[in-house]
Image (cartoon, helix red, strand yellow):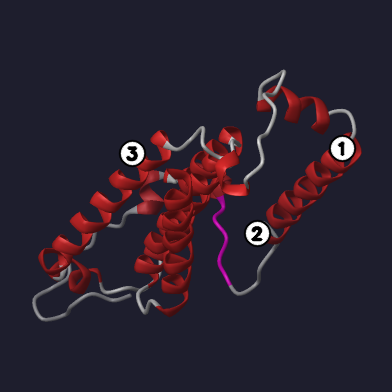
Amino acid sequence: MIATIAFYLFAFFTIAPAVAVIFARNPVHSVLWLILAFFNAAGLMLLLGAEFIAMLVVIVYVGAVAVLFLFVVMMLDIDFSQLRSGFTRNLPFGIIVALVLLAEVIVAISASRAGPVISGQVIPAAKQPNIVALGQLLYSRYLYPFEIAGLILLVAMIGAIVLTHRQRRDTRPQNISKQVRRRPEDATKNVNPGVGEGMKL
């Protein structure tokens, strides 16, 4: 019974924040809704007995991808003074979200081993942990797709570096050697203009 309640709880709080990500007008709020959806998706994985996938969702997606999205959004031209002014107004809603997350964590811990109840089938106990089985399957049967995926990511990273460091004519690049060779007398110039003459550039 508790597994069914936990499933519908996590499913609802995964779909609702996903919809809120689309319809939120503030990009920062969209990223925060996305983090909430990731947490609940991890709860669903925990109910299915895939604790390794659940931790990957929390560590990789919440800890890296969503935080990266948040940093990118914060670099945009957003009026943060308006966001700070609404902090006290949105504080009760934030407390409610925190309490909901705490309740979901408690439910997930209590229903983490009740996954077979959802499907009505009894799953036999695994002879080895999920991480060991996943590693053996990944590096044996799916070794070539795994290596190809890593190669594609490497090519994408190299392409991004090449596109970023290309020679652009619309900007003035920094000449380090010229700056180092510059003498102090060339850097500054002392002038004593007369009264009412001003500076000549």
**Which element carries disc 3, helix, strand or loop?**
helix
Image quarter for residue 32?
A: bottom left
**Which element carries disc 1, helix, strand or loop?**
loop
Image quarter for residue 94?
A: bottom left
Whether label 2 touches label 1, CB < 8 Å: no
Cα–Cα gap, marks 2 and 3:
46 Å
Residue type at mark 3: give it. Answer: Ile
Q: Position of residue 163 (x, y in %)?
A: 71, 61
Residue depicted at x 70% and y 23%: 126
| Residue furthest top as drawn | 127
Residue type at mark 2: give it. Answer: Thr
Q: Closest to the observer: 113 or 201?
A: 113
Which badge, 2 or 1, is on the more N-terminal residue? 1
| Residue 106, label in figure | 3
Q: Position of residue 113 (x, y in %)?
A: 51, 32
Residue depicted at x 80% and y 25%: 136
Which badge, 2 or 3, is on the more N-terminal residue? 3
